[in-house]
Every structure is written in structure tokens, then in C-alpha cells.
């Protein structure tokens, strides 16, 4: 299958309220450009170095999403241009993002990454931390970020019930937090589980392999 076919099939499958972030990590700028020319604008990467290497060779209206764990010392490298940081997993990193956004006289959109998987994942906020952080945000603690929503990754398992449960859990938190000030973006689902994620309320999916093929 070609990239074009994969893209067109996927677009047909996604309901109109669901936004596609094309996960381009490990894939070349040429492949990204091919997808760009078919109309895709949101591309997601998990390494700062890789975004930096690719972005200068690509159109400036690409919206770059950071989806990998972000080290403090790297925030300033992406702050001038990154559209959304989906992987906010600590208060410290949110503070830094706000500060670096201010230096660049802009606002950076972020999602809070919540730990929902049963498996022992390294990154992501606990529920209580997420609530606390959103409250601090609403009180004005991070003036140069806009918290748009939540991001989560389900356990890598064949058990679809478990995956559905984990996504339901994040959706409930999303709804709870939205009672104070509505959140807009619920980012869940990748190649292996996006149909479940959409069924459980995702409105942004992060898809790599189903578009570009397997990563080496
Ligand atoms: C790599 C990655 C994806 C996409 O994975 P695929 O299985 O290739 O669709 C989604 N989200 C995150 C956080 C990733 O690191």
C-alpha cells in the first residue's frame, strides 16, 4: 500500500470530529512532505532533535506536536515554533513551557499526559496530579500555556476490554475536569487501538504505522 492510499483510507474511516495527528517519528522529511501535499498539516514527533532536523526542510505551516517525554533542557529548542506539547507530565515542565513561551512572546498549547495504562509506564501524571495541575492552571499559574485537553496511552495488549476500560477512565476524567472549564481535546488512540479510542470519545488520534508502515 502507498502512503497516499493509507492516508485516504484512514481519512475515510475517521469521523469528521476526529483530528488526525500523523506520527512521523523515524520517517523522512520527504515522506512528511508527501503527506503534506495530500493536505495533512499536523505531524507528531517524540524526539526534539528529530523535529529540529526535519522542520527546517519542511513548510512552515506544519503544526508540530510533541508526543514524547520532554527533558527540561530541551524545552527552549522547540518553544519558538511547536504548536502543541501533548506530553506534559509534570508541574515543572509546564512551568518551563510557560516561561519559554513568554520569552518567545507566544502561547503554547498543551495536553496533560495522564497515566492510564495498567502496565508500568514511566511517564504520565496520576489522576490527582492532573486535577491539581489543571486547578493551578485555571488559577493562572502558567500564563503562557493553553491547556487544551488530555492525552493518554492504553496498555499494549490484545485485550480490547482492558483498552476500552483505560480509555473510558480518561474520558471520565476529561468530563470531570470539563465541569469547571471545558477541555477541548482528548488525544487517545494509535494504530493498534484507535477504533476503540474513538468509540470511547477521542477526538484526536495519533497514528504512525497505519500511514507510513512499520518503523524499523
Ligand atoms: C509512536 C507513537 C504513536 C503512534 O504509534 P503507531 O502505532 O505507529 O500508530 C502514538 N502516540 C505516541 C505517544 C507515540 O510515541
Image (cartoon, helix red, strand yellow):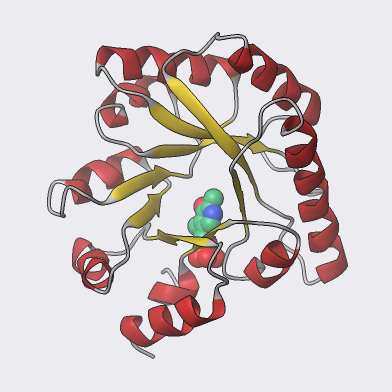
Q: Report the number of discs.
A: 0
Q: Residue furthest left?
A: 57
Quadrant of the image containing the N terminus: bottom left
Where residue 52 appears, as percent x and y from the top left, is 23, 41
Q: Quadrant of residue 74?
A: top left
Q: Is 47 drawn above or below residue 213 in the view shown?
A: above
Quadrant of the image containing the C terminus: bottom left
Q: Is 46 drawn above or below residue 112 in the view shown?
A: below
Where residue 149 appears, as percent x and y from the top left, is 60, 38
**In the displayed structure, does residue 160 sit left or right of residue 193?**
right
Residue 155 visible: yes
Q: Residue at x 21, y 71 (%)?
A: 37
Q: Quadrant of residue 159?
A: bottom right
Q: Residue at x 58, y 63 (%)?
A: 190
Q: Residue at x 74, y 31 (%)?
A: 177
Where residue 150 appears, as percent x and y from the top left, is 63, 40
Residue 123 visible: no
Q: Is 189 drawn above or below residue 94 in the view shown?
A: below
Q: Quadrant of residue 24?
A: bottom left
Q: Residue at x 37, y 20 (%)?
A: 73
**In the displayed structure, does residue 28 sit left or right of residue 176?**
left
Q: Is 212 drawn above or below residue 40 in the view shown?
A: below
**In the displayed structure, does residue 157 sit left or right of residue 24?**
right
Q: Nearer the viewer, residue 69 or 98?
A: 98
Amino acid at each position: 500500500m502507498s502512503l497516499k492510499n493509507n492516508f485516504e483510507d484512514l481519512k475515510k474511516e475517521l469521523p469528521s470530529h476526529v483530528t488526525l495527528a500523523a506520527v512521523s517519528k523515524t520517517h523522512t522529511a520527504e515522506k512528511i512532505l508527501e503527506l503534506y501535499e495530500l493536505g495533512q498539516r499536523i505531524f507528531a514527533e517524540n524526539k526534539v532533535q528529530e523535529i529540529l532536523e526535519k522542520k527546517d526542510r519542511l513548510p512552515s505551516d506544519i503544526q508540530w506536536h510533541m508526543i514524547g517525554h520532554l527533558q527540561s533542557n530541551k524545552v527552549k529548542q522547540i518553544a519558538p515554533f511547536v504548536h502543541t506539547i501533548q506530553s506534559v507530565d509534570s508541574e515543572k515542565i509546564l512551568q518551563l513551557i510557560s516561561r519559554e513561551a513568554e520569552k518567545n512572546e507566544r502561547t503554547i498549547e498543551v495536553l496533560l499526559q495522564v497515566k492510564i495504562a495498567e502496565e508500568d509506564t514511566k511517564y504520565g501524571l496520576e489522576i490527582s496530579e492532573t486535577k491539581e495541575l489543571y486547578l493551578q492552571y485555571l488559577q493562572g499559574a502558567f500564563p503562557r500555556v493553553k491547556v487544551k485537553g488530555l492525552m493518554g496511552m492504553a496498555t499494549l495488549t490484545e485485550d480490547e476490554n482492558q483498552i476500552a476500560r483505560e480509555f473510558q477512565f480518561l474520558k471520565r476524567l476529561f468530563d470531570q475536569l470539563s465541569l469547571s472549564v471545558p477541555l477541548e481535546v482528548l488525544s487517545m488512540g494509535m494504530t493498534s487501538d484507535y477504533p476503540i479510542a474513538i468509540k470511547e470519545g477521542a477526538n484526536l488520534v495519533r497514528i504512525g504505522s497505519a500511514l507510513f508502515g512499520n518503523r524499523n
